[in-house]
Image (spheres, grey):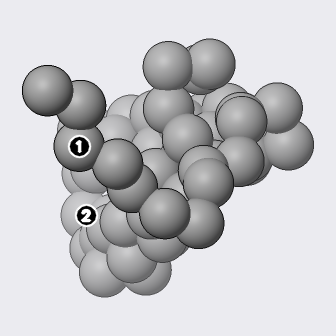
């Protein structure tokens, strides 16, 4: 997870949470997808605590 900044991980957390909120569980495959997304959310949330913070300014490197 160290390859992602905290901001990126937070964005991914938001996306997974959105997907979970719109997921309509109608069959076993949907339930499996829900469990996978929940597991991903736990891992991402753990990554938020360990991901490096991005600096306030971005510099182009030539």
The furthest residue to the right: 49
Q: Earlier in the sequence, mark 2 or mark 1?
A: 2
Residue 19 in the image, given as x and y percentages of width and height: 33, 68
Per the rendering, the mark at residue 26 is 2
Image quadrant assignment for residue 39: top right
Q: Residue at left 23%, top 43%? A: 60
Instruction: Determine the CA span between mark 2 and mark 1.
Output: 48 Å
**Closer to the eye: label 2 or 1:** 1
Q: Which is more toward the observer, 3 or 43?
A: 3
Classed neighbour count for the residue bearing mark 2: other residues with Cα under 10 Å, few (<14), some (14–19), many (≥20):
few
Q: Is residue 24 above or below residue 27?
A: below
Per the rendering, the mark at residue 22 is none
Residue 50 in the image, given as x and y percentages of width and height: 82, 32
Residue 22 in the image, given as x and y percentages of width and height: 31, 80
Residue 17 lies left or right of residue 53; in this view the side is left
Q: Residue at left 59%, top 66%? A: 56
Identify the residue position indicated by label 1 in the image.
60
Residue 18 in the image, given as x and y percentages of width and height: 39, 76
Q: Which is more toward the observer, 43 or 3?
A: 3
Dot 1 lies on which element?
A: loop
Give the position of the N terminus as an image quadrant. top right
Determine if residue 49 is in view: yes
């Amino acid at each position: 997870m160290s390859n992602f900044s905290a901001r990126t991980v937070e964005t991914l957390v938001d996306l997974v949470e959105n997907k979970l909120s719109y997921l309509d569980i109608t069959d076993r495959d949907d339930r499996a997808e829900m469990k996978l997304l929940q597991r991903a959310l736990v891992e991402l949330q753990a990554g938020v605590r360990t991901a490096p913070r991005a600096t306030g300014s971005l510099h182009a490197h030539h």
